Amino acid sequence: MVSYPPDRRELAALFAEDDKLRAEHDEWMAQRQAADEAPVSETLVRKDYGGNAWTVAATAEEPSAFDELQKDTLATVIAALRAEWQADIDNAERRLANLITRMAFPGERAEEETYALKNRFARTELRIRQRELETAKFERQVDNLAGEVVEIKALVGRVLKKFHEIERKSNRRRSKRDDAA
């Protein structure tokens, strides 16, 4: 697209629009400055939801929607409602704290019982290991005694065999003596 420089009529319209906008801006700035310079007692401070504050001069022409008695009554009602709401909030916080405490107690109790069971289990394992060691020691003693019993049986068997041999020899000699006699 080819762009041509604006002609005099277009420039005049643009300058007039600019002058109009500048005049509106100057008027707005004057109102703002007047509001900033107004005495504190006649100034209202307003805030929007973003926390931005601006001051507005109070106008004397604005009629009040309420008389002094109504304003006092509203202030009393609002104060009473705030106190009631604060009491409700405090009560809810107290109930919530009690609920949290009641919910935490079983967990703490279960943790204590878990540690107690863990300790009992460890002690039981220790006793079992001690019994296993004692049993192994007893089994070694039984094996040693069994070996000794086998040795004693063998010894007794040899002794009996010798005794029988001696007794046979002795019986043969007696029978030879008896035969010779």
Image (tube, helix red, strand yellow):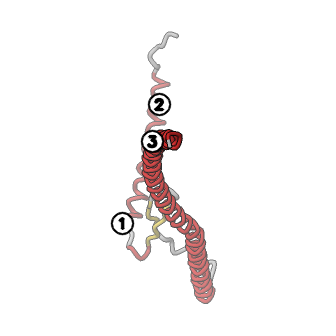
Q: Which mark is nearer the camera, 2 or 3? A: 3
Location of residue 125 in the rendering, given as x and y in whole percent from the top left corner: 48, 55
Instruction: Relative to 111, say whether 148 is above or below.
Output: above
Gap in angstroms between the C-alphas marked 2 and 3: 153 Å
What residue is drawn where x is 41% and y is 77%? 41
Which amino acid type corresponds to the residue marked 2 in the rendered image?
Leu
**Which is nearer the eye, 61 or 169?**
169
What residue is drawn where x is 48% and y is 13%? 3
Residue holding disc 2: 14
Q: Residues within 10 Å of mark 1 (few under 14, many from 20)?
A: few
Which amino acid type corresponds to the residue marked 1 in the rendered image?
Glu
Q: Earlier in the sequence, mark 1 or mark 2?
A: 2
Image disc number at residue 37 = 1
Image disc number at residue 166 = 3
Q: Find out whether the residues at labels 1 and 2 contact each other: C-beta distance under 8 Å.
A: no
Which amino acid type corresponds to the residue marked 3 in the rendered image?
Ile
What residue is drawn where x is 44% and y is 56%? 130
Instruction: Relative to 172, say whether 48 is above or below.
Output: below
The reply to whether residue 157 is in sight is no
